[in-house]
Image (spheres, rainbow, N blue to C red):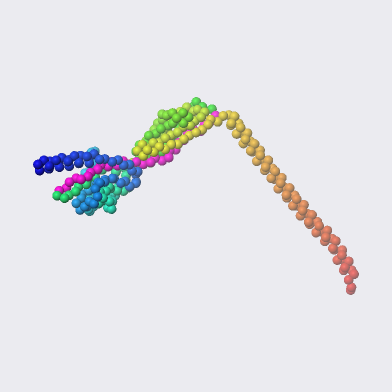
Amino acid sequence: MELRRYGFLLLHLHILQAVIALEEKNIISKLGDNATLSCIYNKKNLQLKNLRVYWQIADDSYQEKCSVVHALISGQDDNRNQCIRFKDRTQLFWDRLEDGDFSLLLLNVSQSDGHTYKCVVQEKIDRPIVIHQTEVVLSLAASYSQPILSGPIRNSDSTGEEVTFNCRSGNGYPKPNVYWINKVNNSRLSPSKTEIVPHDDGTFSVFSTLKVKATSNMQIECSIENEMLQENLSANYTQQKKSSDSGTENDENLEKKGRGAQAAGIIGIVFVIGVLTVLICWLWRRRSSKLVSYRDVQPREDQGGLNSPA
């Protein structure tokens, strides 16, 4: 009976571990951000001195010798075997450990951090037993810049000719999807060429070219899609064909504006000359009146001189 009970217990633990191993989570983080790798065991009031928590890289294709991300033994960080590239970049949430939250904070994530991580929690009473384990898939992404769309400079007789559009965006990850759309009828257009260029920091730039026949109403959209972030950025080009009549009308308007400006200039000059003329006349009259007054007074002074006593 005891043997059967012990065997049943081992079978139960084996099944429990198998179920735990299937637990997997997926998170997406932007390059340069901090990522939280979740590992939560739904049990309260745990004794940290009896626990061992291991975070490690679990990729099947991972071939580096060091795979230790973080370790907690008997309530203390033990990072003696920690990979050098994770040094000072990992930490647990100490105020949550006793409540079964063994999540790991990974700082300043880069493209090389995109792995599957495993959290293994052991409880040691008589011997270590795995009580919880979780796998977390960390995927990295970066938003692309707002696309810049350049199109042709149209003239009046370019309808039917082949014209070229260029669209570019950069600093994104992973590789984007590029779509060209005719907004007149929302139909998809095939690009003539699309080039995706990698950068040293792991991000990409994209350059795409579209060549189409010109129409009288050009409405073209370039869209850059980042599937991982579910972001879709677009730029639009809209230009109506200019007719010869409208060109003539614009020329006439420009000519009218030129004539108006010329007339205004002449009127201004005439006005200034008129003001100066009035001012000169006023000054001349004022001087003449003073001269007349002087002539009237002078004889009186002379007469006064003759009648004065000796």
Q: From what the image shows, is residue 166 above or below residue 265? A: above
Q: Is residue 194 left or right of residue 9?
A: right
Residue 262 image-quadrant placement: top right
Q: Residue 135, position in %: x, y?
A: 25, 42
Q: Residue 302, position in %: x, y?
A: 87, 66
Viewer-nearest residue: 218 or 71: 71
Viewer-nearest residue: 59 or 284: 59
In the picture, the quarter occupied by the C terminus is bottom right
For residue 87, say whether it is visible. no
Residue 300 image-quadrant placement: bottom right
Taking the view exactly as shown, the residue that stands out farthest to the front is 1
Residue drawn at point x = 63 percent, y = 36 percent:
255
Residue drawn at point x = 32 percent, y = 44 percent:
110
Q: Is residue 22 left or right of residue 268?
A: left
Viewer-nearest residue: 287 or 175: 175
Q: Is residue 152 magenta?
A: yes
Please give the range of residues in magenta: 127-156
Residue 177 image-quadrant placement: top left
Residue drawn at point x = 22 percent, y = 45 percent:
132
Q: Residue 202, position in %: x, y?
A: 33, 41
Q: Residue 297, position in %: x, y?
A: 84, 63
Viewer-nearest residue: 171 or 121: 121
Q: Is residue 166 left or right of residue 300?
A: left
In the picture, the quarter occupied by the N terminus is top left
